[in-house]
Amino acid sequence: MLLINPFKQSFRNPSTRSIFNLRKKKDFGICNPVTVGCVSPERPVPESVRKPPYYFKYMPPGNTIGEVEIKSSEQIYRLRASCKLAAKILHSCEDIVKVGNTTDDIDAFVHEKIIAANAYPSPLRYAGFPKSICTSVNNVACHGIPDNRPLMDGDIVNVDITTYYNGYHGDCSKTFMVGDVDERGRYLVESTQECLMESIKLCSPGKPFNTIGKFISTFVKKKNLGLIPAFIGHGIGSYFHGPPEILHYKNSMPGIMEPGMTFTIEPILTLGGPDIEIQEDGWTALSVDGARSAQFEHTVLITQKGYEVLTALD
Ligand code: MF3
Ligand code: CO
Ligand code: CO
């Protein structure tokens, strides 16, 4: 989610960019840049499916500042079931993320699967979001709205699925490669997945949350990649976004992991610079320099011994 309370502006504000910035344009590899497209009407959700409160009345995004909830075994059981459902559906997207299919086709496919499982697609109507999933292609950093753009050979597309099932949200995403992706693109996608998996391995009781951001900053430097710092991981449960805030860059935020805490980790790595611009639709975050980025996300539980990836496939 978008960091709304940055304790430190460690990234350049787009408004400070100047026409006198004489930097050589970097080689970002080959891709077809994306702009915003046409969005289809909201997909219906049957009466029988349990809906989150924001379905009935507009609400602002959840507050990620404050006490971190320690979940009971009953809560963990329910959250795990929602996470497994999201992960299974995300995995099945392999079949539909193909050249010629639109991101709206992916939205339709996932929407149907979620409804068929008697669950609700969490993004729909969340803080006014119009579709059931987020699809972020090439230079879209995140929160892309599924539209009528057909996928092209060489695209990279992040599909972010969150299900609301038995009263709990399970959140995960991965970046798919469409057809023949160039070498820079493959390097970006593979490195981003590695970055997420390695940062999860650092999770255990007693560890500061800021261990994650510290690791990611070192990782991207080593890989000669960039980082988009404006989007954070978040606590999750009966709410979509809650405490703690998981910053994906070097920081000194307080807070220690404890058994029963559940949160997401969802770093966005880029071939270019850190700046993004939110489009007029209020969501689509485009990279200012047109560079591609990739993102992977898991929902993680802190256990007595370490961690459990709740959105892992069984
Ligand atoms: N799934 C996104 C996340 O990882 C949140 C999307 S909010 C939406 O936090 F409204 F854009 F769907
Ligand atoms: Co997500
Ligand atoms: Co998330």
Image (spheres, rainbow, N blue to C red):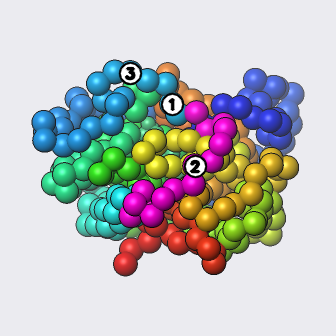
Is the CB–ligand 1 distance for label 1 below 8 Å?
Answer: yes
The residue to which callout 2 is attached is: 69
Identify the element where label 2 is drawn. loop
Q: What kind of residue is marked 2? A: Glu
Image-quadrant location for residue 225: bottom right
Q: Residue at x 76, y 65 (%)?
A: 207
User: How many residues crowd around disc 1 within 10 Å: few (fewer than 14), some, or many (20 or more)?
Assistant: some
Q: Position of residue 180 (x, y in %)?
A: 43, 68
Residues at marks 2 and 1, CA–CA distance in whole angstroms: 18 Å
User: How many residues crowd around disc 3 within 10 Å: few (fewer than 14), some, or many (20 or more)?
Assistant: few
The main secondary structure of the magenta stretch is loop
| The residue stretch that appears in magenta | 63-77
The residue to which callout 1 is attached is: 61
Would residue 240 appear left or right of 214 to someone viewing this image? left
Q: Residue at x 51, y 56 (%)?
A: 71
Circles 1 and 3, Cβ within 8 Å, touching? The answer is: no
Q: Earlier in the sequence, mark 2 or mark 1?
A: 1
User: How many residues crowd around disc 2 within 10 Å: few (fewer than 14), some, or many (20 or more)?
Assistant: some
Count the numbered circles shown.
3
The residue to which callout 3 is attached is: 58
Identify the element where label 3 is drawn. loop
- Out of 135 and 224, give the one closest to the viewer: 135
Q: What kind of residue is marked 3? A: Tyr
Instruction: For residue 107, say whether it is visible.
Output: no
Image-quadrant location for residue 314: bottom left
In this view, the mark in front (2 or 1): 2
Q: Position of residue 76 (x, y in %)?
A: 44, 61
Q: Quadrant of the N terminus?
A: top right
Would residue 231 appear left or right of 168 to someone viewing this image? right
- Out of 112 and 178, give the one closest to the viewer: 112
Question: Is residue 36 magenta-colored?
Answer: no
